[in-house]
């Protein structure tokens, strides 16, 4: 049985998707350089599923390593997660982001085309919508980006669209994630960012567990009900299942489709803080800080296309998201590092 190749398979979303793929009967091959992930995540996925993953260490910019990978393993499709993802860091290190994300994807596609593997699920982002003029945001909304990270995702979308235009026998889905949060309900795998978290939920969790003294809420003067930014938070397990559905869709279809993965509901930063502290009975001290450059007021998905094309919709509630985040953090205060 051929493998599904996960680039960046040991990362937060990659590891949860690996588990859902194994549960759905697929064979999984992970290719990861571990720049922001841990082999322990995949070890735990193996324990949870009772199945093994082929783990190869390597970088998607390394064409020779990719050729070797495809020659040694029968691969039917690729789910492409590998990429740098910190908005703030991308403004400091734009060349690093363009090299890793954009050049890495071009190298991957070149090797895929060479070996005749033409099914690709790409990990895109709602950042490609920039500061959207309408919410909920449909896939047809104009695209733009407010930072190099978002720009790198947008460039990749254009590159993949051009490739399918030139070679229509490719099948691709561009999955535009909104804000992934939560963890597997076992508490065994979850988000384990290097250094200071860039995303809200791991920051809340680290404050709750006592690793950080308080949460900074960036801006309380946005045109939203409580003045804090509103986002579409989606449980990572729902997101992972969206990738399984996207692969199943590509088994029957060529061409390219952009698909939002979100809930269609927006919650503010303070909504998230209150839900976390109420549901988990734990204090989350916070202070208001100035707005961050590049942040937008409101962003949530129009998720109908995913339901129509993939038969997928988010099933986990906000309570599930905050409960599962806390279970992971409280059981693994230092993430995978103590394992």
Image (spheres, rainbow, N blue to C red):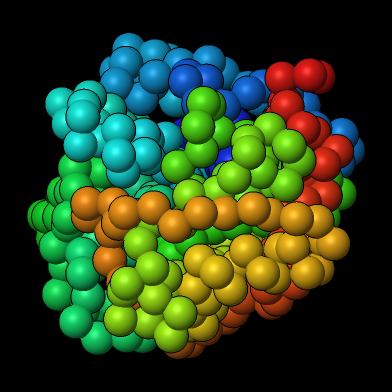
Q: Quadrant of the C terminus?
A: top right
Q: Residue at x 55, y 48 (%)?
A: 215
Is the residue 40 above or below the residue 273 in the image? above
Residue 282 coordinates in the image, percent (x, y): 80, 56
> Does residue 316 show up?
no
Q: Quadrant of the N terminus?
A: top right
Q: Is residue 208 left or right of residue 254?
A: right
Is the residue 166 above or below the residue 310 in the image? above
Residue 249 coordinates in the image, percent (x, y): 49, 68
> Does residue 230 show up?
yes
Q: For residue 68, which quarter of the picture?
A: top left
How many numbered badges does the structure rendering display? 0
Q: Residue at x 15, y 75 (%)?
A: 142
Residue 262 coordinates in the image, percent (x, y): 49, 72
Is the residue 64 above or below the residue 81 in the image? above
Q: For residue 51, which quarter of the picture?
A: top right
Q: Nearer the viewer, residue 281 or 54?
A: 281
Q: Residue at x 35, y 47 (%)?
A: 118
Q: Nearer the viewer, residue 124 or 283?
A: 283
Q: Is residue 191 left or right of residue 255?
A: right
Q: Nearer the viewer, residue 55 or 144?
A: 144
Q: Residue at x 68, y 32 (%)?
A: 211
Residue 61 coordinates in the image, percent (x, y): 29, 21
């Amino acid at each position: 049985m051929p493998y599904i190749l996960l680039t960046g398979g040991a990362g937060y979303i990659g590891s949860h998707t690996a588990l859902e793929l194994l549960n759905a009967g697929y064979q999984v091959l992970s290719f990861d350089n571990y720049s922001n992930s841990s082999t322990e995540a995949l070890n735990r996925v193996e324990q949870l599923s009772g199945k093994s993953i082929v783990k190869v260490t390597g970088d998607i910019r390394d064409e020779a390593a990719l050729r070797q990978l495809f020659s040694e393993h029968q691969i039917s499709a690729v789910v492409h997660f590998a990429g740098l993802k910190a908005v703030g860091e991308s403004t400091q290190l734009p060349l690093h982001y363009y090299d890793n994300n954009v050049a890495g994807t071009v190298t991957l596609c070149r090797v895929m085309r060479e070996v005749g593997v033409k099914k690709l699920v790409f990990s895109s982002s709602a950042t490609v919508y920039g500061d959207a003029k309408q919410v909920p945001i449909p896939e047809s909304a104009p695209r733009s980006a407010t930072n190099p990270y978002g720009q790198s995702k947008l460039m990749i979308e254009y590159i993949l669209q051009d490739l399918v235009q030139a070679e229509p026998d490719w099948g691709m889905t561009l999955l535009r994630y909104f804000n992934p949060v939560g963890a597997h309900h076992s508490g065994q795998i979850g988000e384990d960012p290097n250094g200071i978290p860039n995303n809200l939920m791991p920051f809340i969790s680290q404050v709750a567990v006592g690793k950080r003294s308080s949460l900074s809420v960036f801006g309380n003067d946005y045109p939203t009900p409580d003045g804090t930014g509103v986002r579409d938070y989606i449980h990572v397990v729902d997101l992972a299942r969206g990738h399984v559905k996207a692969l199943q869709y590509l088994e029957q279809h060529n061409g390219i489709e952009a698909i939002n993965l979100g809930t269609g509901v927006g919650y503010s930063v303070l909504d998230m803080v209150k839900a976390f502290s109420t549901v988990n009975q734990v204090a989350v001290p916070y202070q208001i800080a100035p707005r961050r450059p590049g942040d937008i007021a409101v962003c949530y998905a129009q998720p109908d296309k995913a339901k129509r094309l993939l038969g997928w919709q988010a099933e986990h509630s906000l309570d599930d998201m905050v409960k599962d985040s806390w279970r992971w953090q409280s059981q693994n205060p230092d993430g995978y590092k103590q394992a």
